Amino acid sequence: MWEEDWENAIIDFAHWQGEINYHKAQESLRNLLLNLDLKEEEKQGLETEIAHLNQMLQKLEDSVIQIAAFGMVGKGKSSVLNALIGQDIFITGPLHGVTREIDQTNWRLSKESIGNGEQNIQRLIKGSENVQIQLIDTPGIDEIDGETRETLAHDIASRVDLILFVIAGDITRVEYQALCQLREVGKPMILVFNKIDQYPQSDRIEIYSTIRDVRVRELLSPDEIVMVSASPLETVAVKDKEGKVKIIRQRGKPQIGDLQLKILEILHQEGKSLVALNTMLSTGQINERLIQQKLVYRDAEAEKIIQQTMMTKAGAIALNPVTAIDLFTGAIIDVVMILRLSQLYNIAMTQQSAVKLLQKIAISLGGITASDVLVTFGLSSLKGILGLTTPVSGGLTVVPYMSVAIAQGAFAGVSTYTIGQICKVYLANGASWGENGPHAVVENIINSLDETSILNRIKGELKAKLGRRLIR
């Protein structure tokens, strides 16, 4: 008596812990949907993933637990599900592969559907009375080709909360492969040895022992194997109209109680935890895809902003003959770029904070920025002198002026490109430099830059731009 009470106390504790986990999963999924942080254009192509998140939240709101049956054709998957609910809902028959498509129905737990009046059974039913159970029938694993079968099985198994794998004798090679694939999904599983009425007692025990101790010893524990007879055939003697006795075989009462009890125990003890765990696993996978898509989109948009700003600054510096204005204009353009990038990544930033970020990046760049400033200052001064002497020299200094202007603009463009790349990483990381700090981020980006290609590109565009400007 004491041991039974202690066991019930453990089961009840697990049940209430499951309720806590369940509510945490609900709250987490609600918060995720409320804070997706996706612009309308970023949602394009992600409609299926977002719809799945909403479906999972609805599943949590409705307290739905999904159980899927897998197995080869003719092993009695549909019969097992019908026996569980006490009704012939799923199609069964002698034809090969009757279940061609995924089918499902709801299983409402009740004294009538369980058919067992034991007090412990009724307590388990009462503990799961607010749960909706969906039973899902799948096509036979040997009815479709291997690649499609693996994809379909993985897709269904990743969404449901409990797997029933139905066999009707010793496990075949195809069944073992499918069992291994389903086991990799990481969901709770019950191996259902069906049609035990077709075997003598000794043969039945021998097959069960072989399955338990040899075939699936590395995959399943003995507690995860249950023997049933979902649609047993009984031999009975009946009299015809003439009073003659005939021996016929007819369908008997399903022997399904052990499986019902096992499912009830799982649902009561860890059902809510299973749903919560499965929801969070699926949510995590979908959220990773959403984040990846968002980052890819924003990275492409950030590159456009950086490239546009790079050429704007290069052109402005190249066309401006006044040294002080060169430096001031360049800083303003960089600050505007940082503000545009912060809007893209949904990071609140004022003009003052953008200036501070630019200063921090400049400090982290160290000698590179200092040398760039000296180069810009020197080229700007030379460019100013050449610009003033152009009228006097009769245009002879136009070519030197363009060369200096292009060089200065190219250096300024590379500087802005570098700042933009650093700022992009900082904002994409949620306005954080990460564990290693700004210096490490700056160093990694500088090492990855191909300054030669950037300079050549800027010089080419500036040459065309300045040429048109000077001709006018």
Image (cartoon, rainbow, N blue to C red):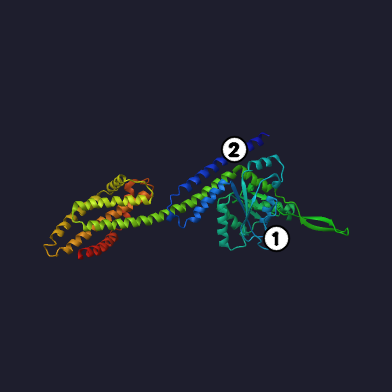
| Left or right: 94, with 221 as reference point | right
Q: Residues within 10 Å of mark 2 (few under 14, many from 20)?
A: some
What residue is at 66 percent from the left and 47 percent from the top? 108
| Left or right: 295, with 59 as reference point | left
| Left or right: 76, with 343 as reference point | right
What residue is at 39 percent from the left and 47 percent from the top? 430
Tell me the tag on residue 382: none
Whole-percent x, y for residue 425 in the image: 36, 51
Pick the residue in front: 381 or 206. Answer: 381
What residue is at 68 percent from the left and 41 percent from the top? 122
Marks 1, 2: nearer the viewer: 1
Q: Residue furthest front?
A: 472
Q: Circle 2 is placed at which residue position?
A: 13
Kindly indicate the quadrant of the structure image that contains residue 400.
bottom left
Kindly indicate the quadrant of the structure image that contains residue 403.
bottom left
What amino acid type is highlighted by mark number 2?
A: Phe
Q: Circle 1 is placed at which residue position?
A: 93
